Amino acid sequence: MSERDYKMADHLLMGVDSAVRTLFGRPLVTERANPADSIDETDLSDQERDLTARLMRINHTGEVCAQALYQGQALTARLPQIREQMERAAQEENDHLAWCEKRLVELDNRKSLLNPFWYAGSFMLGAAAGLAGDKWSLGFVAETENQVGAHLDEHINRIPQQDKRTHAVLQQMKTDEAEHAELALKAGGAELPQPIKTAMKLTSKLMTRSVFYL
C-alpha cells in the first residue's frame, strides 16, 4: 500500500469497505492457515457447547472492536509508517475474526447482534486516539492488546480442555495479541494514564456481559 499516495477520501472509502466486510461480509485475511484446521472435532455436551459458543461470540465481537480501532487509528495516524503498521495489524486481526466466526458456525451458534454498535464506538475511539498523536495511538493499541490477552487467558481456562480446536484458535490469538502490543511499544507507544486504562476495562466488561447474551 506504500506504493501509492492515498488521500483522505481513499482511506474513508477503504474504511467503509472494511466496516461492511467486518460486519456483513468476509474480511480480507492474510496468508495464514486456521490453527484448528488440522485438529479433529471433539464431542461436547450441550452445556459445554453453549458456554464455548458464548465465549467465542465474545471473542468474535472483540475482534470486531479491534478491527474498528485499527481502522479508526489508521484514518487519523499522522505518520505514514504508523498508518501502515495499523493496517497490517488490522489484517492480522481479520484472521482472528474469520477463525472465531468459523468456530461459531461449527458450534451451531451466531455472531452478536450488537456488533454494529460496538464497531461504531470502537472506530470513534480509534480515530480519537489517532488524533491525540501517534505515541498515544500506539499506546492505546498496546493497552488494548494487553487487556485482550487477559480475556483470552480467562476463556482458555473456562473452555473444556478436550475442545482442542477452540484452544488452538485462542492460543494463536493470544500469541498474536502479545506481538501486536510489543510492536506498538517498540514503535514509540506511550503508557496510558491509569484512569484511561480503568475506563477501557469497564467498557470491556460491558461488552463481554452484553455479548454473552446477545
Image (cartoon, rainbow, N blue to C red):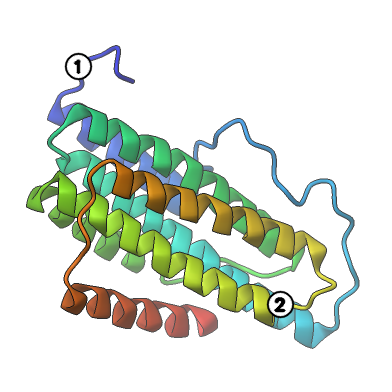
| x 56%, y 59%: residue | 174
Task: Reply above or below: 18 against 102.
Answer: above
Which percent across, then down, holds residue 141?
A: 31, 55
Check disc 2: other Cα within 10 Å, few if <14, some if 14-19, many if 20+.
some
Nearer the viewer's eye, disc 1 or disc 2? 2
Task: Reply above or below: 30 against 143.
Answer: above
Under tag 1, what secondary structure?
loop
Inspect the image, locate mark 2, and give the three-letter code of the amino acid beneath it. Answer: Ile
| x 23%, y 50%: residue | 189
Check disc 1: other Cα within 10 Å, few if <14, some if 14-19, many if 20+.
few
Q: Which labelled disc corresponds to residue 165?
A: none
Which percent across, then down, holds residue 206?
A: 36, 83
Q: Which labelled disc corresponds to residue 159?
A: 2
For the question of whether residue 101 can be seen, the reply is: no
Quarter assignment of residue 86: top left
For the question of whether residue 166 can be seen, the reply is: yes
The alpha-carbon separation of the residues under discs 1 and 2 comes to 46 Å
In the image, is 191 to the left or to the right of 116? left
In the image, is 60 to the left or to the right of 14? right
Q: Are marks 1 and 2 in contact (CB under 8 Å)?
A: no
Inspect the image, locate mark 1, and give the three-letter code of the amino acid beneath it. Answer: Asp
Q: Quadrant of the N terminus?
A: top left
* Nearer to the camera, 127 or 86: 86
Instruction: Quickly name the residue at label 1.
Output: 5
Which percent across, then down, holds residue 18?
A: 37, 41
Quarter assignment of residue 76: top left
Which percent across, then down, holds residue 51?
A: 68, 82
* Nearer to the camera, 25 or 45: 45
